Image (cartoon, helix red, strand yellow):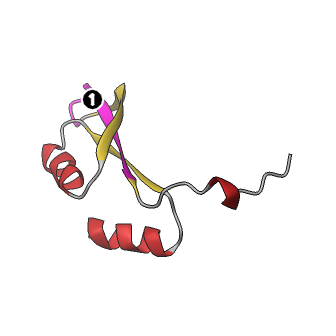
Amino acid sequence: MIEELSEVAYKLGLEKLVVEVPDLSTAAINAFTKAGFYRAAVLPNMVKDRDSMPVDVVVMMKDIKPAHDEAYDYDF
């Protein structure tokens, strides 16, 4: 499913995908890492688990297409 989302993102012309995963979800983090995502940041104590204990959130990113500076049209 992660690869399908990457393909859709590529077809839509997106440059990056971002996912936020609780740091307890090791299987999810491993799956995203295997699919080419990398850890971009960790947000400490961002969510709570079922026991109301704080849990860090891992922000992961994947580059889909390189940025094309000439393609940006700034209106400011």
Give me the residue at 23% from left, 35% from top.
23
Q: Is mark 1 on a helix, strand or loop?
A: strand
Queried whether the magenta region covers residue 3, the answer comes back as no
Depth check: give the residue in front, 9 or 29.
9
Farthest residue to the right: give it. 76
Residue 50 image offset from top left, x and y in percent: 22, 37
| Amino acid at circle 1 | Val
Overall secondary structure of the magenta stretch?
strand
Q: Judge left or right: residue 27 versus residue 13.
A: left
Give me the residue at 84% from left, 52% from top.
75
Could you tell me which quadrant the C terminus lies in? top right
Asked which quadrant contains residue 17, the reply is bottom left
Q: Judge left or right: residue 45 versus residue 17.
A: left
Residue 39 image offset from top left, x and y in percent: 30, 38
Residue 41 image offset from top left, x and y in percent: 37, 32
Residue located beneath label 1 in the image: 55
Depth check: give the residue in front, 65 or 22.
65
Give me the residue at 28% from left, 69% from top.
3
Q: Count up the numbered dots.
A: 1
The magenta segment is 50-62
Could you tell me which quadrant the N terminus lies in? bottom left
Residue 34 image offset from top left, x and y in percent: 18, 55
